[in-house]
Image (cartoon, grey):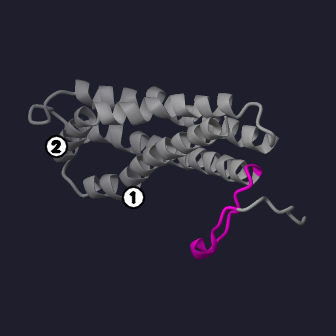
Amino acid sequence: MKALRSTTLVLAAVTAGLMAGLFAAFAYSVMPGLKRSGDAAFVEVMQNINVAIVNPLFMTMFMGGLVAGLAAVVANWRSGDPAVRYWAIAGFICYLVMFLITSGANVPLNDKLAAAGDPATIADPAAVRAEFEGPWVAWNIARAVVNVGALTCFALALLRSGRQAGVEVVADPRAAKLSPARPMSH
């Protein structure tokens, strides 16, 4: 049972981390790079990205994060350390908030951008861009931040779970060893 608890926490942390990294990369590199592009080019590239990103790997990570987070909550529900359960719940809630932001804000904006049509035939690509770019960037930053929160919560649950299992967590990996848990001084 301990292995299942740890495995679910690792999977939840990994999927949250991958998604947080993706959204953060858009925030600090992709969107600033596209900001330098002309309006028609911006619309075309974002339309292409929005089509390309809906692929099996992305969908597995994106949807799998929900499953992994819920599995982490369920598997750790009766953990000996209530903090493990609480951190897992907090991580799942953060991931769920990211999922809702994506589904409720970013995807509808993507759909609206796609409905604008071929950038070569859009009468006013600047207006299409203006309606999309600011809100999409703001919501993307929000989902990146909340997903970093999910990653942090799952990582803290995993650390607490490791302490509970008697794994010593040390800052220097050369000094790492498995040993019976020592009582922590407060």
Within the image, what quadrant is residue 176 found in? Answer: bottom right
Residue 29: x, y in percent? Answer: 34, 58
| Residue 48 visible in this rendered orientation of the protein | yes
Q: Are marks 1 and 2 in contact (CB under 8 Å)?
A: no
Q: Identify the disc placed on residue 28.
A: 1
Q: Identify the disc placed on residue 136.
A: none
Q: Hey, which residue is sitting farthest front in the picture?
A: 179
Q: Amino acid at mark 1?
A: Tyr
Residue with the mark numbered 2? 40
Q: Is residue 49 above or below residue 110?
A: below
Discs 1/2, front: 1
Query: Which of 54/46 is in front?
Result: 54
Q: Secondary structure at mark 1?
A: helix
Q: Is residue 161 left or right of residue 63?
A: right
Crowding around mark 1 (Cα neighbors within 10 Å: few <14, some 14 to 19, many 20+) is few
Q: Amino acid at mark 2?
A: Ala
Query: Which of 28/68 is in front?
Result: 68
Q: Is residue 47 left or right of residue 173?
A: left
Q: Is residue 41 left or right of residue 139?
A: left
Residue 52: x, y in percent? Answer: 23, 36
Question: Which of the marked residues, 1 or 2, is nearer the chain's N terminus?
Answer: 1
Residue 179: x, y in percent? Answer: 72, 62
Within the image, what quadrant is residue 110 found in? Answer: top left
Quadrant for the N terminus in the image: top right
**In this picture, which residue range is highlighted in magenta?**
164-178
Instruction: Inspect the magenta stretch and tell me whether residue 175 lies in it.
Output: yes
Residue 186: x, y in percent? Answer: 90, 64
Instruction: Inspect the magenta stretch and tell me whether residue 57 lies in it.
Output: no
Query: Which of 50/119 is in front?
Result: 50
Within the image, what quadrant is residue 70 found in? Answer: top right
Query: Which of 37/21 is in front?
Result: 21
